């Protein structure tokens, strides 16, 4: 049977793993040129981050109906609205001090 590691050993290992240097995104094997005669693999989709937003029931119902009437998901509606904000509605405006 293997010896159980102490919490100190585990913490030390976790610190070592989280602080080691990683290769820049452009240097991964996935971006290496494909061998002759083979096509490169399609680019992997960007990783998404999940968020939680508290809505009152009426707003949630409105959002679901709005999305359903347009044949899109609630996530697509929210991402579209954030994209509009990102695309210019908030750019150039000063933030409160």
Image (spheres, rainbow, N blue to C red):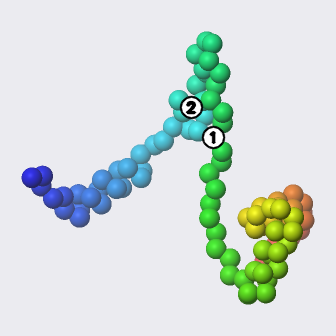
Determine if residue 70 is in view: yes
The location of residue 7, given as percent across then percent down, is: 23, 64
* Residue 49, picture quadrant: bottom right
Give percent across and percent down for residue 63.
80, 75
The answer to whether one can see residue 91 in this image is no
Secondary structure category for the residue under label 2: helix
Q: Residue at x 63, y 40 (%)?
A: 44
Of 47 and 64, the residue lying toward us? 64
Q: Residue at x 30, y 53 (%)?
A: 13
Q: Which residue is mark 2?
A: 30
- Name the one closer to the observer, 59 or 97: 59
Please tell me which residue is depicted at 38% across the width and 50% down the height of the picture: 17
Residue 10 in percent (x, y) is at 27, 58
Residue toward you, 94 or 63:
63
Q: Assess whether mark 2 and mark 1 are in contact (beta carbons under 8 angstroms).
A: yes
- Expressed as whole percent of the image width and height from the top left, the position of residue 95 reads 82, 72
41 above or below 9?
A: above
Q: Residues within 10 Å of mark 1 (few under 14, many from 20)?
A: few
Which of the two residues, 78 or 74, is positioned nearer the viewer here?
74
Q: Is residue 87 left or right of residue 43?
A: right
User: Looking at the rendering, in which quadrant would you find the C terminus?
Assistant: bottom right
The picture quadrant where one finds residue 91 is: bottom right
Mark-to-mark CA distance, 1 and 2: 9 Å
Q: Which residue is mark 1?
A: 44
SS state under label 1:
loop
Residue projecting furthest to the left: 1
Q: Residue at x 78, y 74 (%)?
A: 64
């Amino acid at each position: 049977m293997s010896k159980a590691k102490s919490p100190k050993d585990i913490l030390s290992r976790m610190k070592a793993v989280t602080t080691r240097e990683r290769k820049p995104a452009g240097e991964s094997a996935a971006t290496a040129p494909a061998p002759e005669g083979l096509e490169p693999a399609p680019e992997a989709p960007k990783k998404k981050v999940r968020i939680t937003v508290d809505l009152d029931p009426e707003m949630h119902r409105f959002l679901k109906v709005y999305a359903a009437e347009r044949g899109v998901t609630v996530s697509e509606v929210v991402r579209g609205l954030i994209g509009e904000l990102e695309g210019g509605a908030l750019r150039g405006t000063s933030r409160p001090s």
